[in-house]
Image (cartoon, helix red, strand yellow):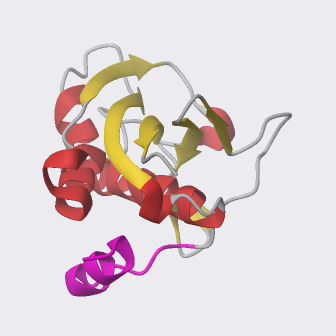
Amino acid sequence: MTIAARLADLGITLPRPAAPVASYVPVVVHGGVAYVSGQIAFHDGHVIKGRLGENVTLEDGIAAARACGLMILAQLEAAGLLEQVERVVKLGAFVNSTADFTDHPKIANGASDLMEQVFGGAGQHARAAVGVAALPLGAAVEVDAIVALKSA
């Protein structure tokens, strides 16, 4: 089954890939590995903003991380790489949070669970989930990815 067919089965429509907000490219491929730049969460074309532990609920944070994961997939698709994914190797989740918020792993599960839904066992990955004082554009969550590609 293709990834496009799997997305359709899951009822997932990928968003339009976001343009970089600074001096970087969305995806770099080197040595059979795709490095996807950090993707922030969007809903209806607007950045999902806020801080976990202050004005963003746990459920909304998980949804924001899932939206970041969708944007990672959209960037891979835009680069012509989505069907070449062999394995999601690692995700890095950055959570805009208060100093006393400690559920970063639960937030990151929004993106992690999506990768497993889409890629099955090949979507299981290593991960870091960390809290930060601020993210670009006031985003609540940002996620980046390292993805192994199939040999041509």
- At horizontal 18% and vertical 61% (from top left) the residue drawn is 117
Q: Is residue 123 above or below residue 99?
A: below
Residue 52 percent location from the top left of the image: 34, 36
Quarter of the rendering containing residue 118: bottom left
| Residue 96 seen in render | no
Of all residues, the one furthest to the right in this rendering is 23
Q: Is residue 69 above or below residue 2?
A: above
| Count of number-bearing discs | 0
Q: Nearer the viewer, residue 7 or 1?
A: 1
Instruction: Give left or right: position of 106 versus 60.
Output: left
> x, y percentage for residue 70?
42, 61
* Residue 100, picture quadrant: top left
The spot of residue 27 in percent (x, y) is 65, 43
Q: Is residue 49 above or below residue 83?
A: above
Residue at the front extreme of this rendering: 152
- Quadrant where the N terminus lies? bottom left
Q: Is residue 132 left or right of residue 46?
A: left
| In the image, farthest residue toward the top | 99
Question: Residue drawn 25% across and 25% down?
Answer: 126
Is residue 47 or residue 23 the one in the foreground? 23
Residue sitting at x 61%, y 64%? 80
Q: In x, y percent, where is residue 91?
A: 37, 33
**Can residue 31 be seen by looking at this rendering?**
yes
Residue 83 is covered by the magenta coloring: no
Residue at 18% across, 53% down? 116
Camera-nearest residue between 17 and 67: 17
Q: State the extent of the magenta-drawn residues as a range.
A: 1-15
- The answer to whether residue 4 is magenta is yes
